[in-house]
Image (spheres, rainbow, N blue to C red):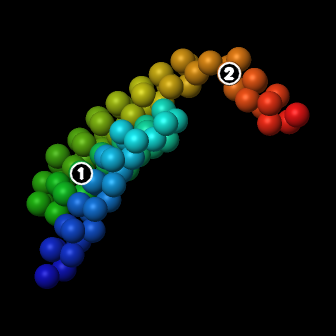
């Protein structure tokens, strides 16, 4: 019974964070939602007693791919648009 409740909880977390990846307008928020989604998939592997696969999920996907996405988002942001937004909000 507890396994079913845990699975339903993490299924809801996975689905809501995957939906957040698609619906968030900010790329940084999408990357964070992707990290939550990938971590919750690792929990499924732990529930299936596949600890090695869960650790590889965390190391490769969360640790590697998500860091690359984060660097890509930070390096490709338009700083002039950020300055214009702060100037408009201050006036």
Q: Quadrant of residue 7?
A: bottom left
In-front residue for pair 63/88: 88
Mark 1: secondary structure: helix
Classify residue 54 as left or right of residue 36.
left
Residue 50's spot in the image, x, y percent? 13, 54
Classify residue 83 as left or right of residue 44.
right
Q: Residue at x 35, y 30 (%)?
A: 65
Precedes in sequence: disc 2 or disc 1: 1
Decide: few, some or many residues near mark 2? Use Cα within 10 Å; few <14, some 14-19, many ≥20.
Answer: few
| The C terminus lies in quadrant | top right
Residue 41, numbered label: 1
Residue 52's spot in the image, x, y percent? 17, 48
Nearest-to-viewer mark from 2 and 1: 2
Please say whether residue 17 is visible from this viewpoint.
yes
Residue 3, numbered label: none
Please say whether residue 35 is visible from this viewpoint.
no
Q: Residue at x 36, y 31 (%)?
A: 64
Classify residue 25 as left or right of residue 1.
right
* Vertical arrangement, residue 5 with respect to residue 27, above or below: below
């Amino acid at each position: 019974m507890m396994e079913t409740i845990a699975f339903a909880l993490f299924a809801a977390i996975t689905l809501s964070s995957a939906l957040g990846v698609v619906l968030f307008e900010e790329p940084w928020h999408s990357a964070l939602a992707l990290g939550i989604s990938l971590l919750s998939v690792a929990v499924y592997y732990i529930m299936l007693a596949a600890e090695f696969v869960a650790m590889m999920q965390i190391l490769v996907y969360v640790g590697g791919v998500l860091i690359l996405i984060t660097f890509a988002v930070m390096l490709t942001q338009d700083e002039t648009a950020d300055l214009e937004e702060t100037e408009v909000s201050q006036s």
